[in-house]
Image (tube, grey):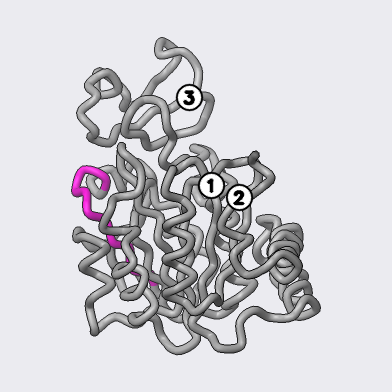
């Protein structure tokens, strides 16, 4: 992100505090949300605030290849709201609920151009682990991207949490999870997701990032066939120029590798060894 002296905007003394509270750093036209002055939690291009700047956010939108017309998307983890803004702008028939436990993150929503709540958007200040136990909610797609200064909070990666995610989804729904491959418990988290979703899971690497995006489906017919997957990618590409065709190819490659090497092969990504 450059030298501290080059940082402008809202950074100030907060970047040196080290108290775990979120702050904003702006460098070279990129505005980022950070907790520790090192790791970027969310990033926005100031001159194009609706664009998905980070690889992992574009990979998360790959759920469109597997569930192309969600009526309701719920997100655990607001961050800088990149995915919220993208979905509101590009999926006009979809309502969005964003669940964020940290009020300090929500307080920065205006700096990232996150719209105020309205008919299509709710931002809730609550624990995502509590939200998924709410019987009144049944999203078609649930995105779990909840990180704090220490990584993924324990309540967002337990076996019970993944069970609740599956149970709350609408019929045929899907959960999308952002995991970090460097987490020592990555394999444990992956195994728990697979058990909760009866193996209806595929994981892909998020571009050049160390993030791994997990798609876990409640649909008994998951996954779609190769031809259907690529046809969807081509059909969606005009409206969503975010690399859906190469992402569809990565998904298909992951599915084929699982079939060749066994159902547990996806837990360890050998490419990072």
Marks 1 and 2, the one that precedes in the sequence: 2
Residue hosting label 1:
211
Marks 3 and 1, the one that precedes in the sequence: 3
User: How far across and how far down the image is residue 164, in percent?
Assistant: 31, 75
What span is colored magenta in the figure?
96-105
Q: Is residue 200 above or below residue 205?
A: below
- Mark 2 Cα within 10 Å, few/some/many (few <14, many 20+)? many
Residue hosting label 3:
27
Give the quadrant of residue 183: top left
Give the quadrant of residue 5: top left
Disc 1 on helix, strand or loop?
strand
Residue hosting label 2:
206
Q: Is residue 71 above or below residue 241?
A: below
Judged by depth in the image, the label closer to the viewer, 2 or 3, is 2
Judged by depth in the image, the label closer to the viewer, 3 or 1, is 1
Marks 2 and 3, the one that precedes in the sequence: 3
Disc 2 on helix, strand or loop?
loop
Q: Is residue 80 above or below residue 69?
A: above
Quadrant where the C terminus is found in the figure: top right
Any part of residue 12 in sight: yes
């Amino acid at each position: 992100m450059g030298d501290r002296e080059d940082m402008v905007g809202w950074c100030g003394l907060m970047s040196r505090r080290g108290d775990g509270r979120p702050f904003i750093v702006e460098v070279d036209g990129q505005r980022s949300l950070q907790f520790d002055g090192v790791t970027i939690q969310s990033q926005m291009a100031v001159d194009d605030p609706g664009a998905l700047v980070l690889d992992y956010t574009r990979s998360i939108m790959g759920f469109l290849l597997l569930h192309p017309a969600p009526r309701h998307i719920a997100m655990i983890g607001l961050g800088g709201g990149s995915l919220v803004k993208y979905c509101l702008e590009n999926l006009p028939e979809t309502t969005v609920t964003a669940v964020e436990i940290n009020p300090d993150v929500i307080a920065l929503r205006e700096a990232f151009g996150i719209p105020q709540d309205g008919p299509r958007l709710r931002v809730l200040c609550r624990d995502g682990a509590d939200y998924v136990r709410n019987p009144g909610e049944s999203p078609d797609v649930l995105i779990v991207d909840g990180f704090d200064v220490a990584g993924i909070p324990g309540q967002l990666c337990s076996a019970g949490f993944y069970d609740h995610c599956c149970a709350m989804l609408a019929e045929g729904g899907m959960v999308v999870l952002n995991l970090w491959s460097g987490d020592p418990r990555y394999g444990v988290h992956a195994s728990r997701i697979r058990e909760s979703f009866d193996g209806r899971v595929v994981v892909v690497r998020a571009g050049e990032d160390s993030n791994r995006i997990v798609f876990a489906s409640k649909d008994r017919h998951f996954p779609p066939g190769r031809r259907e997957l690529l046809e969807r990618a081509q059909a969606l590409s005009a409206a969503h120029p975010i690399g859906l065709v190469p992402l569809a190819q990565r998904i298909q490659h992951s599915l084929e590798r699982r079939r060749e090497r066994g159902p547990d092969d996806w837990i360890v990504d050998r490419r990072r060894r």
